[in-house]
Image (cartoon, helix red, strand yellow):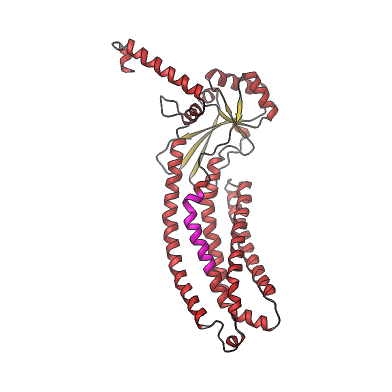
C-alpha cells in the first residue's frame, strides 16, 4: 500500500505542475510581459507632442537607461503574441516565455513607434528621475501595473476541480490509513503513542513529497535555463505553490487519522483491522473514489479547454491596445476616457465637430468620409 501512495503522490505532483504551468503562471506571465527590472508608467496626457518630448528627453538625458513599450498583436492562432519595442535593444536579453501559448517579438524602439503608443511605457529610471521627467513634460506620470487577466479567474474556472482533487486526496489518505491500521495497532501495542505514529507518517510523506518536487522542479528549471526561458519568479512561485499542496496533503492525513481510534486489539490479533460496519464504510469509500477519479479526469480535460478559451476572450479586448480608431480600437485610451470625465467630454465635443463638418460639406467629396 505504501508503494501505491508513492505512485499517487507522484501523479498528484505532475497533475498540479500541469495546473500551475497552464493556468497560474500562464496568467502571471501575461500580466508581466515587460522586462523584469523595468517598472511600468502611464502618461496622464499622452498627446503626440508630449510623447515626442518624452522620447527626445529620454534619448538625450538618459542614454544609459532602458525604455520599452508593448503592443498586443492581433492573430488568428491560439497564441498571445506581444511586440516588444526596446531601447537600446542590445541591452535586452530577449528571453523566451515559459508558456508555449505566449510569443514575444522584439524590435528596436524608434520615435515613430513611441509616438504611435498610448502613453504606457516601461523603464528603469528611478522615482526621482521619473518626477524630474514629469516636471519637464508638465504632466503627471502615473505608475502602471498591467492586470489584463484577473487572477480571480484561476479560482472561477478551477474551483470545482480543486474541490474534486481535495476529495480525491482525502480518500486516498483514508484508504492508506485504513490499510495501515494493523501496523499502527502493532506499534501501539509496543508502546508507541498515537502522536509519535502520526509524526512518523507525516515525516515520511513530507520527505517523499519534497524529494519528488525537488527533482521535478530541478528538471523543469534546468530545461528552461538551457532553452533561454528560465525565470526566477517561476522557481519562487512554484515552490510556494507546491508548499501549499504539501500542507493540504498533511491536513488530509491528519483528517483521516481519526480512523486510528477504530483499531481494536482483539480484531488485530484475529488478523482483522476494522469492525464490520467500518469495513463497509471503507469499501464504499473505494467505490466513491473510483467514481471521483473518473469524474475528475473528464472535468479537468473539459475545464482545460474552457480555461484557454476564457483567457483568449479576456485578451481579445486587450489585443487591440495600441491601435488607433483608423485601424481598430484603442482600449487603453478608452479605459482612460471612461475614468476621466473631462477627457470623455473632450471626445464628445470632437465628435460633434465632425458631425457638423459632415453636415456642412455633405455634397462634396467629404461625404465619402461622413
Quadrant assignment for the N terminus? bottom right
Quadrant assignment for the C terminus? top left
Q: Nearer the viewer, residue 348 or 55?
A: 348
Q: Nearer the viewer, residue 353 or 77?
A: 353
Q: State yes or no: residue 332 in magenta.
A: no
Can residue 122 be seen here? The reply is yes
Question: Left or right: where does residue 77 sit relative to residue 155?
Answer: left
- In percent of width and height, residue 47 lies at 53, 20
- In percent of width and height, residue 309 lies at 42, 46
Q: Quick check: 358 above or below 180? A: above
Q: Quick check: 155 above or below 350? A: below
- Report which quarter residue 51 is drawn in: top right
- In percent of width and height, residue 189 lies at 67, 84
| Residue at (54% x, 49% y) in the render | 24
Q: Quick check: 208 above or below 229? A: below
- In percent of width and height, residue 16 lies at 54, 57
Q: State yes or no: residue 164 in magenta.
A: yes
Q: Give the magenta range.
A: 154-171
What secondary structure predominates along the stretch shown in magenta?
A: helix
| Residue at (45% x, 61% y) in the render | 296
Amino acid at each position: 500500500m505504501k508503494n501505491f501512495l508513492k505512485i499517487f503522490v507522484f501523479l498528484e505532483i505532475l497533475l498540479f505542475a500541469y495546473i500551475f504551468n497552464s493556468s497560474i503562471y500562464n496568467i502571471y506571465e501575461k500580466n508581466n510581459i515587460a522586462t523584469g527590472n523595468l517598472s511600468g508608467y502611464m502618461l496622464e496626457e499622452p498627446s503626440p507632442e508630449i510623447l515626442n518630448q518624452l522620447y527626445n528627453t529620454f534619448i538625450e538625458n538618459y542614454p544609459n537607461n532602458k525604455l520599452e513599450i508593448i503592443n498586443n498583436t492581433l492573430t488568428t492562432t491560439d497564441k498571445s503574441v506581444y511586440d516588444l519595442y526596446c531601447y537600446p535593444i542590445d541591452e535586452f536579453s530577449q528571453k523566451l516565455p515559459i508558456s508555449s501559448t505566449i510569443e514575444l517579438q522584439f524590435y528596436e524602439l524608434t520615435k515613430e513607434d513611441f509616438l504611435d503608443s498610448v502613453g504606457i511605457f516601461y523603464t528603469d529610471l528611478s522615482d526621482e528621475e521619473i518626477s524630474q521627467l514629469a516636471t519637464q513634460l508638465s504632466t503627471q506620470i502615473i505608475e502602471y501595473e498591467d492586470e489584463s487577466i484577473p487572477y480571480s479567474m484561476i479560482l472561477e474556472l478551477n474551483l470545482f476541480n480543486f474541490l474534486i482533487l481535495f476529495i480525491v486526496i482525502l480518500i486516498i489518505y483514508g484508504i492508506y490509513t485504513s490499510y495501515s491500521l494493523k501496523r499502527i495497532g502493532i506499534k501501539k501495542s509496543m508502546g508507541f503513542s498515537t502522536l509519535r505514529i502520526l509524526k512518523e507518517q507525516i515525516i515520511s510523506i513530507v520527505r517523499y513529497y519534497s524529494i519528488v518536487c525537488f527533482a521535478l522542479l530541478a528538471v523543469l528549471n534546468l530545461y528552461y535555463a538551457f532553452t533561454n526561458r528560465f525565470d526566477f519568479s517561476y522557481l519562487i512561485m512554484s515552490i510556494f505553490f507546491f508548499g501549499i499542496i504539501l500542507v493540504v496533503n498533511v491536513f488530509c492525513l491528519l483528517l483521516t487519522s481519526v480512523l486510528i481510534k477504530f483499531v481494536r486489539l482483539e480484531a488485530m490479533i484475529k488478523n482483522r483491522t476494522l469492525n464490520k460496519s467500518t469495513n463497509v464504510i471503507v469499501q464504499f469509500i473505494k467505490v466513491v473514489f473510483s467514481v471521483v477519479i473518473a469524474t475528475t479526469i473528464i472535468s479537468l480535460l473539459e475545464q482545460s479547454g474552457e480555461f484557454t478559451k476564457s483567457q483568449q476572450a479576456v485578451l481579445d479586448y486587450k489585443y487591440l491596445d495600441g491601435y488607433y480608431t483608423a485601424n481598430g480600437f484603442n482600449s487603453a485610451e478608452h479605459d482612460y476616457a471612461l475614468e476621466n470625465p473631462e477627457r470623455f467630454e473632450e471626445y464628445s465635443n470632437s465628435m460633434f465637430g465632425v458631425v457638423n463638418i459632415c453636415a456642412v460639406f455633405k455634397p462634396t467629396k467629404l461625404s465619402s468620409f461622413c
